Amino acid sequence: MLNKYKETADFINLKIKHQPEIGIILGSGLGGLGNKIKNPIFIKYSDIPNFPVSTVEGHSGQLIFGELGGKQVVAMQGRFHYYEGYDMKFVTFPVRVMKFLGADKLIVSNAAGGMNPKFRQGDLMIINDHINNFPEHPLRGKNIDELGVRFPDMSKVYHAEYIRIAEEIAKANNISIHQGIYIGSSGPTLETPAEYRLFRTFGADATGMSTVPEVIVAHHQGMKIFGMSVITNESVRENPDEITTHEEVQDVAGLVEPKMTKIIVGLIERM
C-alpha cells in the first residue's frame, strides 16, 4: 500500500501547480463548496492510478486543487464508503495520498441523522468526538511505521482550537450550531428506531456511514482535524409514517450548505 500511496501522489504532483496545505472531504449534498475554490484544477478519480471510484448519487467523483480562504487546498467531491464494497484501505486511500501531497490538516463534512432530541433537521453540528461502530478498522493489519505509530492515542482527535474558531465564526454570522459526538457505522441501511435508541444510549448525538475511518487514518498520520455534520433527518418524526430517503438527505444538505461553507471558509482563513 505504501508504494501505491507514493505512486498516486507522484502522478498527481505532475498535474498540479501548488502543494496543498489542507485536505477537505465533502459529503452527500455538500459538493458545492468546491465551486468556491479559485483557479481550480480538476482530476477525475477514474483518471488517478490506484484510486477507487465513487458510486453514490450526489458524489461527483473528482479531486479539486486550488485556493480557498487564502490557502492551497485539495477537496474531494465525493468520498468512498465501506458499504460500496471497498475495504478500509481504499475507503481511506485518498487521506493517505493527501498527506503525501503535503496536506497536514483535514476538514471532513457529512450528512448525518440526528439523535440528540435538541437537534432539528437542517442544524449544524461540530464533531468533538466519535464512536467507531464499523465492523472493520482502517488500521487493521501490519503497521507502516513511516505513516504512524502502531497504537495511536485517540483521546484528542478533533482540534480544540479549530472548534473554538468555528464556534466564533458561527456566532459572528448568527448561525446556530451544536457540538456533539458522531457515530459511524457501515450502512447502507438507515438506522432502525431501536438502533437510534441504542446509539443514543452510547452517547452519540448524530449518526452516519462515513467520516470515522477517514479521521482515524488522518489522526494516525498526524493531521490536524476538524469535522462538521449537517443534520438531515431526526430520529423522532412528528409523523411516524414518514421515511427518510437519500434524496431528502441530499436536499437538506444542499439547503444548509451555504452556512457550512461560510464557517469552513472562515476557518481555513485562520488555520
Image (cartoon, helix red, strand yellow):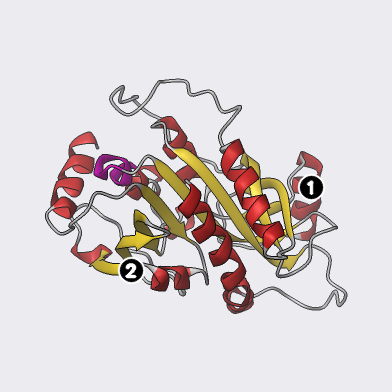
The answer to which of marks 1 and 2 sits earlier in the sequence is 2
Q: Is residue 191 visible?
A: no
Q: Say which residue label 2 marks.
A: 38
Q: Amino acid at mark 1?
A: Arg
Measured as percent of width and height from the top left, residue 148 is found at 37, 26
Q: In the displayed image of the protein, which residue is found farthest to the right?
A: 238
Specify whether 46 is left or right of 108: left
Q: Which mark is residue 21?
A: none
Residue 118 can be seen in this image: yes
Q: How many marks?
A: 2
Disc 1 on helix, strand or loop? helix
Magenta range is 96-102
Residue drawn at x 48%, y 37% as measured from the top left: 216
Q: Is residue 101 magenta?
A: yes
In the rendered image, the quadrant that contains the N terminus is top left
240 in magenta: no
Q: Which residue is mark 1?
A: 200
Could you tell whether 55 is left or right of 185 in the image?
A: left
| Position above or below: 102 against 81 | above
Task: Look at label 2 and name its amino acid.
Answer: Lys
Q: Residue at x 88, y 74 (%)?
A: 238
